Image (spheres, rainbow, N blue to C red):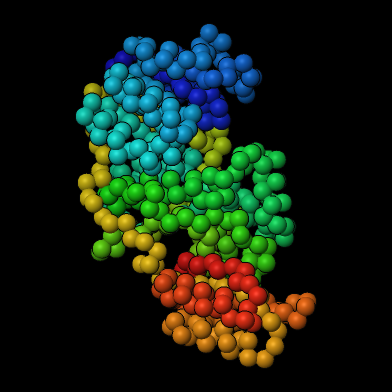
Amino acid sequence: MKEVINVGIIGFGTVGVGTVKLLSENADSIARKVGSRLVIKRIADLDITTPRSVSMDPSLLTTNADDILNDPEIDIVVEVIGGVSPAGDYIKRALEFGKHVVTANKELIAKEGANLFPLASQLKRDLMFEASVGGGIPIIRPLKTCLAGNEILEIKGIVNGTTNYILTRMKDEGISFVEALRQAQEKGYAEADPTSDVDGHDAAYKIAILASIAFTSRADVTAVYREGIREITADDLNYADQLGFAVKLLAIAKKFSDGMSVRVHPAFVPKTHPLAHVHGVYNAIFVRGSAVGEVMFFGRGAGSEAAGSAVVGDIIDIARNINMGATGRVPCTCFDQLPMLGMESVSCRNYVRIIAEDKPRVLAAIAAEFANYDVSIESVLQHVLPDSCAEIVWLTHEAPEPSMRAALDAIGHLPVVKQIGSRIRVED
C-alpha cells in the first residue's frame, strides 16, 4: 500500500471543481476505502484567478499543464478540459510518462478512443472515463463488469440534460424552442453556443461510446445518424400528449445479426415507458441484455458534483489498482468489427404533421401517396387553420425508413400540400 497517491487535475471548471470538492470533503472516508490518502498535488487551468465555489491553496494552481505531466510524483492525471485538442495530447503524454488517467471527455473518447485505449493497455496503465456518459449515473462500469456476461442487444436513452430540460419547458409552459433555450441558458443548463447539445452532437458522442462497449465493436461516431431538436414545436408536443406519447431526444443503439444501428433523433415515446417520465435535466439509460432483460439507469446527467462523483469513483478505482499492483487489467473490449448500419435499416412508426389546403379529397390524395409506398395509416387528426388551410396529423404503422422518406417526398410535391411541418419517429 502506498501511503499517499498524488492526483493532478487539468481543468478547473465545472467538473474540476466538483472533483476537487469531493476529494477534499470526503478525504477521510476515501482514504479508508482505498487504504491510501489521495492528495491533490496540482491543478492546471488557463484561468486561476476567477474565484471558485471550493477553497484551494493558491500554491497548487498553475496555468501550465506540463507542471502536472512532468511531475514524477503524480500518479493519476484527471483531464476535464474537454475537446479533442490539446486534451488528447495531454492524455497520451500522461500515459507515456507512466501515469494513469481519468477523463470526462466524451468527444475525445468517441473520436480518439481507438488510439488511446490500446496505448493504455500496452503500457499497463488505467484509462477510465465513467463521467463521459451520464454524468453521475454509473453506466460505463456496469456495461464493462456487472453486465459483461450478457449479450447486450439494445441501449436507448436520454443522455443530454440540456435538450431534455428544453423539451420539458416547452411542454409544461407551451413555449417555443427559442424561449425554452433562453431559459436553459439563463439557468446555466445550456452554453452560450448550444450547438453541441441541441443539434445532437453531444448525444452522438455518448451513444457511440456506449455502443462500442455494449457491442464489443468500435462505433464510428461519424457514421452515427443525428437529428437535433431545433425543429420541434409546442404543437408537436401537444399532439404527442393527445396521442399518448412524450417527445424526447433519444440516443439509440441496436445490435442486429448483420451489424449495429446507432442514431440520435427526437422520438415519440409511449407514456407507458419509463423514459417518457424523465423530465428536466435528468438522464436515463435503458439497457436490454440477453440474460438480465431490461434495466434502466436514472439520475442527474450533468452538474459539478454529479460529474465529479463519477470522476472520483474512477480515481478511487485506479488508486485501489495501484495498491494491488493490478493496473491495466481492463483492456479495450472492441475486438469485433460490426458494420455500422445506415438509417435504411430502421423500421418504425411515424408521426407526421402536414399543412394542406382545407378542401375535399385532400386527405385522400395524401393517403394515396402513403399507400403508393406501402405506408399504412394508423390514425389521423385534422384541425382547421386560418386562410382555408388545415393541419393534418398522421400516425403511421411501422414502415421502413426508405419507404417513409419516399412517401414524404411525394407528398411534399402535391399541389394541395403547403408544408410538411414535422416528421418524428415513434420509438415503441
Q: Is residue 395 above or below residue 428?
A: below
Residue depicted at 31% across the width and 44% down the height: 144
Q: Can residue 299 be seen in this view?
A: no
**Given the current orientation, which residue lies at the most extreme bottom position?**
360
> Which quadrant would residue 141 be assigned to in this image?
top left
Give the residue at x 37% y 45%. 209
Give the quadrant of residue 5: top left
Residue sitting at the far right: 386
For the N terminus, the image quarter is top left
Could you tell me residue 272's position as x and y percent? Answer: 52, 67
- Residue 420 shows up from this direction: yes
State how many labels appear: 0
Residue drawn at the location 67% of the way across and 67% of the way down: 235
Give the x, y percent position of residue 358: 70, 84
Which of these two is toward me, 353 or 156? 353
In front here: 171 or 400?
400
Is residue 27 placed above or below 225 in the rendered structure?
Answer: above
Q: With 234 as the anchor, is 38 left or right in this view?
A: left
Q: Percent position (x, y) of residue 29?
A: 45, 24
Q: Residue 20, relative to residue 226: is it above or below? A: above
Residue 127 pos. (x, y %): 33, 31
Identify the residue shown where x is 53% and y is 48%.
160
Above or below, 50 relative to 270: above
Specify whether 50 is left or right of 265: right
* Residue 47 located left or right of residue 187: left
